[in-house]
Image: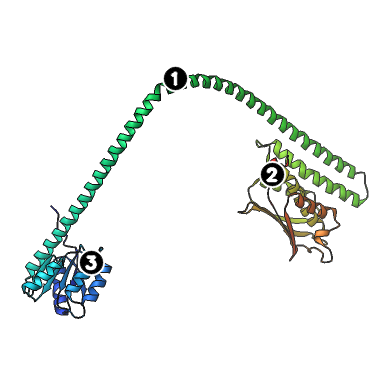
Amino acid sequence: MTTIDDSANVLVVDDNSLNLDLLCRILSKANFKTISAIDGKDAINQVSLQHPDLILLDIMMPNLDGFEVCKLIKNNPDTKNIPIIFMTGLADTETKVKAFKLEASDYITKPFQKAELLARVRYQLQVFNLRKALADKNIALQNEVDQKYEAEVLLLDINERLGCANRFLKDEIKQRKAIALKLEAEIAERKQAEKKVKQSLKEKDLLLKEIHHRVKNNLFIVSSLLESQADYIDDPEVIKMLETSQNRITSMGLIHEQLHNSTNLFQIDFQQYITVLVEHIADSYLTKEIDFHLNIQQATVNIETAHPCGLIINELISNALEHAFHNRDRGNITLEFNQDRLGFYNLLLKDDGLGFPHHKNFYQSESLGLELVSTLVEQLEGTIEMTNHNGTQIKISFKELDYKTRV
């Protein structure tokens, strides 16, 4: 049996404030939640906003009487099922008949008895809950019927398909047995081929490691020869040229050294590479105390990109160490490297030195090092930008070169 919810929302509509307060107190003491409306328009608004469970509605009201309010509520699909109990001092039969024709649930004549009021309210709420439960059960039952019907139709379709499938099943089994025998033979062949490929790849990896090792050794030998040659030369300019060439060769040799010691023979750990390269360049300029500030994002790049980028870093740092701190023994060089959301690598080098001379054009410099930087940036298909502000700042942006498309 459906229980009565004494906490239901009851809308009380009466243009007499004393009656309104009395009704609300009676209902509240019986644990009902009350909503009040002083006239018909207010009642329509409260119904729209609060959607009460039951309405106690006075008939005689100015502007919009209870009959008109009832008609509006019942004509609205969203509120038509809310039970309405008319409360009025009119006791004639015609008024009562009109009320029930408007689909009112009940009719109470004033003055009313408290017990009668509460009994009628509880009864109408119980009837409303029963109707709602019945409607829900009807909907559920109809859904169940629809589902069973759909299931039966689906079952008939499945049975028909199974009949068709069974006609071809025996032939399919025979074909699959023949295919299985062929697959077994093919798998055996593929396993043998895979074993050969793995052996070949292992041999190629060893060969590639050996190549990187020999290239590294040869580059370091050339670097050592340049260093030895400098011992027999007295001209400072020539010695400087030999040291610069030695640094360039070392920057390339470090790449092959890293590849030789890595399990990935095609990608460079650029963070580690830049750190080692900067340490080497700093060691070659021991005459000045320069503080290096590195902010290098973890990244791996292919060898085609790493070579020109390493040479660019070597040229820019060497140029800063030679020219930015003229007549100064201390200074700061900052090197940053990161990749943005668009896939561009951004290389930033700045110092707090003298700045690039204003009478010289950075982009058309006669210096071999800066000319080499411009050429290498073009090789990377990147852009370069120089600014002078409390020193020199150079920013280079580029993407990793696609080695496969260049073969």
Residue 152 in the image: x percent, y percent? Answer: 27, 37
- Circle 2 SS class: loop
228 up-or-down from 171: above or below: below
Amino acid on which disc 2 is placed: Asp
Q: Is residue 334 visible?
A: no
Q: Check disc 1 and report the residue beneath it.
A: 174
Residue 296 in the image: x percent, y percent? Answer: 66, 51
210 up-or-down from 340: above or below: above
Q: Check disc 2 and report the residue beneath it.
A: 402
Q: Would you say the residues marked 1 and 2 are in contact, meaning their CB atoms lie under 8 Å apart? A: no
Amino acid on which disc 3 is placed: Asn
Left/right of residue 113 with respect to residue 162 in the rendered view:
left
Foreground of the two, 251 or 132: 132
Q: Nearer the viewer, mark 3 or mark 2?
A: 3
Mark 3 vs 2, N-terminal side: 3
- How many C-alpha atoms fall within 10 Å of the one at disc 2: few (<14), some, or many (≥20)? few
The image quadrant of residue 226 is top right
Distance between the Cα atoms at labels 3 and 2? 72 Å
- How many C-alpha atoms fall within 10 Å of the one at disc 3: few (<14), some, or many (≥20)? few
- Circle 3 SS class: helix
Distance between the Cα atoms at labels 1 and 2? 50 Å
Foreground of the two, 377 or 78: 78
10 up-or-down from 151: above or below: below
Residue at 62 percent across and 54 percent down: it is 340
Number of marks in the rendered image = 3
Left/right of residue 90 with respect to residue 376 in the rendered view:
left
- Circle 1 SS class: helix
The quarter of the image holding the C terminus is top right
Mark 1 vs 2, N-terminal side: 1
